[in-house]
Amino acid sequence: MADWKALIADDEPSARRGVRQLLAAFPEFGVSGECRNGAEVLAALDSSQPDVVFLDIQMPGMGGFEVIRRRTPERMPAVVFLTAYDQYAIRAFEAQALDYLVKPVTEARFAATMKRLMRQLRAPLVRSDESIVVSTARGSTVLRVPEIDWMESAGNYARLWIGSRSYLLRESLHVLEDRVRDYGFLRAHRRALVRLSGVRELIWSNDGGLMTVLASGAKIPISRRRRTAFATAVRGMGRPA
């Protein structure tokens, strides 16, 4: 018996058949139904309560994004978007989709998606990875919150660091703190948030201050008033202090 239920929504019969064939390699999933348009999807979400919906972006009458808007992201199962076009990728991640597949989908690409999906479904108390969209010189980039090492205030912006690369986001650190708290970010000082799972060690600086060293190599000072709370949180994650 399958562990999870999958709903397939696409107005093209060949596309629905293709997803069924790809899903056959994953016996953990059973197909709870197929839909040809957004209205059928909304009805099926209530009747079959799937764990994941493979959702076409462009369908007659009501597309995938409109389905999510009407249902609300909070009431949706995991969403894997299907489309013949790649220009909707940023919008898909803003809609908190698990993944975005461009048709025709290869077996390898589908398998990578299923691996992520099963990891999420096996840890139901963990929120799906939130994404942050930032502007760059080349357009827009999607950053997964669990991949961000630390964040610092930069005037009216926040600077997000992944390794040695940084990205500017027009959002205050205070607002960001509420968004990323569930991902293990903690204040190191008034102007910096650090992802605790990326902490490698805590060290004392030459002037007697406490610093955190991240796996990326970044060294961030910890304010005196936050030392105890920060060190306790690091110890709680099994990191050496």
Image (cartoon, rainbow, N blue to C red):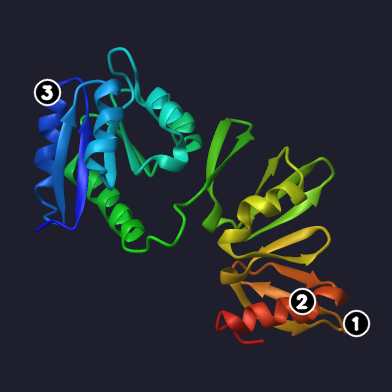
Chain-order first, disc 3 or disc 1 = 3
Q: Position of residue 100 (x, y in %)?
A: 35, 37
- C-alpha span from label 3 to label 1: 68 Å
Left or right of residue 225: residue 11: left
Which quadrant of the figure contains the C terminus?
A: bottom right
Give the labeled residue for mark 2.
211
Work out which residue is located at the far top of the displayed protein and give it.
61
Q: Nearer the viewer, mark 3 or mark 2?
A: 3
Q: How far apart are labels 2 and 1 at the CA level?
A: 11 Å
Q: Which mark is residue 13?
A: 3
- Residue 56 at x, y percent in the picture: 29, 27
Discs 2/1, front: 2
- Identify the residue shown where x is 32% and y is 39%: 80
The percent position of residue 68, horizontal first and vertical second, equals 41, 31
Q: Secondary structure at mark 2?
A: strand
* Mark 3 nearby-residue class (10 Å; few <14, some 14–19, many ≥20): few
Residue on which the image places disc 1: 207
Where does the N terminus fall, quadrant-wise?
A: bottom left
For label 1, the crowd category at 10 Å Cα-Cα, with few meaning under 14, some 14 to 19 and many 20 or more, is: few
Badge 3 or badge 2: first in the primary sequence: 3
